[in-house]
Image (cartoon, rainbow, N blue to C red):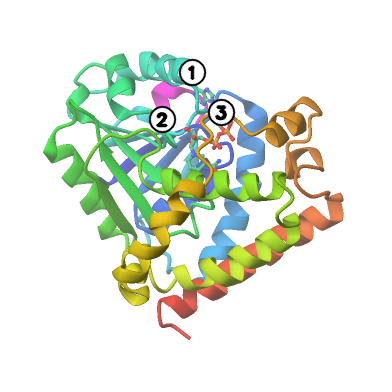
Amino acid sequence: MIKRVALIGLGTMGPGIAARLSRGGLEVKAYDVSQGAVDRARGTLDAAEGVLDRLDIRAPPSGAGGVHFVSTIAEAVDGVELVIENVPENIDIKAEAYREIDPLIAPSVIVATDTSGIPITKLQAHISHPERMVGMHWSNPPHIIPMIEVIGGEKTSAATVVAIRDLIRSIGLLPVVVKKDVPGFVENRVLYALLREAVDLVERGVIEPEDLDTCVSWGIGYKIAVIGPMALLDMAGLDIYKSVSSFLNADLSKRDDVAPVVLEKNAASKFGIKSGEGMFSYTPERIKALQGERAHKLVAVRRILEGRE
Ligand code: NAD
């Protein structure tokens, strides 16, 4: 039974994950190497708690749950049944974190990684008892999006996959088991297929960036939240899909490198919201407004999709 969790890495994803696990009644010990990250995480944790209130995700009975910030990795993993590694998407940084954690935990402790797409088989080469390592891929913002991918590597035991799947279910979230350890898993493979085509269409001047977003959000996105791609195929008809894909697939982008427009923006340090400019431009006021507006809309849409309004 998993009751206590160590969360290692409190950047973009950590605080939302901590808040959601705590609401599920788990005791979370949260750790980051950077004191600045811990200070920021305290603020984002409060904001995530506010969003969870708006989603009516009730606090657990008194005495259960809670997020405790700790100052060493040893304190974080002491007495836990699960470690969730949430450090940057870099195999060397992750391997270094496992080297620190490994001697401090018993073989029975499950080690989950929130990697967005590094194969679990590669990561589990850096930890002893690799059967207890599993992918637990949250979607950003993790306190709002209920779906979590669960991925076993070549050496992950079936029991580890089941334990994490059941834990996710037990706190009211939606586990999706990915049966093969493919790079990017499923969510990011589908997203990156869409992004490759979207970037290509903008780059080739087929459409303006704003119009691309309107087309995808109101055409595909709005619909796909209700009718998933497999169900959509049945709704459209497999005969229609056969006929359109017979000529359209050959015309879709197949580039296997990074698109020039993305390289140019990177070379000019235009990374998006974090630098004030990317595909669009942002003032600090606009960024603050967008963050509030997006959280508000995601909460409203989720309440409707769950039939709560
Ligand atoms: P981030 O860079 O925002 O935060 C990572 C944190 O880990 C930093 O605060 C850093 O100080 C800390 N850290 C580094 N080494 C550490 C160590 N040895 N011990 C403790 N803390 C350490 O990263 P992020 O965006 O939160 O992503 C974390 C993981 O989640 C990555 O694997 C990423 O691919 C995955 N992920 C990210 C997103 C996203 O949208 N950002 C979505 C899903 C999954």
Residue in the foreground of this view, choosing between 227 and 208: 208
Q: Which residue is mark 2?
A: 76
Circle 2: is it few (<14), some (14-19), or many (20+) Cα within 10 Å? Answer: many
Secondary structure under the numbered disc 2 in the rendered image: helix
Q: Which residue is mark 1?
A: 93
Indicate which disc, 3 or 1, sits on the residue closer to the N terminus: 1
Residue range of the region highlighted in magenta in the rendering: 70-76
In whole angstroms, how far apart are the C-alphas of marks 3 and 1? 25 Å
For badge 1, the amino acid type reads Ile
Residue 130 relative to residue 234: left or right: left
Secondary structure under the numbered disc 1 in the rendered image: helix
Q: Is residue 30 magenta?
A: no
Q: Is residue 74 magenta?
A: yes
Q: Which residue is mark 3?
A: 257
For badge 2, the amino acid type reads Ala
- Taking the image as drawn, is residue 54 in sight? no
Residue 118 relative to residue 125: left or right: right
- Taking the image as drawn, is residue 251 in sight? yes
